[in-house]
Image (cartoon, grey):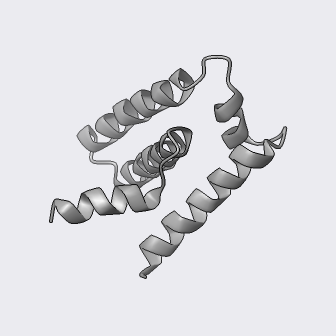
Amino acid sequence: MDDTDAVLDELFAVIEDRKEQLPEDSYTASLFTHEKGENAVLEKLGEESTELLLAAKDDDREEIAHEAADIVYHLLVLLSLKDMDVEDLRAELRERR
């Protein structure tokens, strides 16, 4: 497993833990309990996608990396919401090679 795999697995484990434990001071936990339900995560994905596109248009490499990371994080939250995991994503990507 390379570093990227390890980082994704670690982040997903934290997301799953927040989903189970629901600590009050956790942004991640708030996404699982938000009054809008899964729409809260879907809206964040849309917002972060727009921010990534604007950063790309401006050729702002630092902001591109930041917004791309936000998208990956919210994508992992969505996978967790749908009772999926990182391996589901990996399997799909492997099929596309």
Nearest the eye: 53 or 94:
94
| Residue at 16% from the left image edge and 59% from the top image edge | 96
Most extreme residue toward the left is: 97
Question: How many numbered tags mark residues here?
Answer: 0
Tell me if 97 is positioned left or right of 1 in this view.
left
Most extreme residue toward the bottom is: 1
Nearest the eye: 92 or 55:
92
| Residue at 48% from the left image edge and 49% from the top image edge | 84
| Residue at 34% from the left image edge and 48% from the top image edge | 60
| Residue at 60% from the left image edge and 22% from the top image edge | 37
Location of the N terminus (image quadrant): bottom left
Q: Quadrant of residue 2?
A: bottom left
* Rendered position, 92 above or below 48: below
Image coordinates for residue 83, horizontal then vertical, percent: 53, 44
* Rendered position, 97 above or below 16: below
Most extreme residue toward the right is: 24
Image coordinates for residue 7, horizontal then vertical, percent: 52, 69
Location of the C terminus (image quadrant): bottom left
Tell me if 17 is positioned left or right of 58 in this view.
right
Most extreme residue toward the top is: 36
Q: Quadrant of residue 35?
A: top right
Image coordinates for residue 5, horizontal then vertical, percent: 44, 72
Tell me if 20 is positioned left or right of 39 in this view.
right
* Rendered position, 52 above or below 16: above
Nearest the eye: 83 or 8:
83
Image coordinates for residue 38, horizontal then vertical, percent: 54, 26
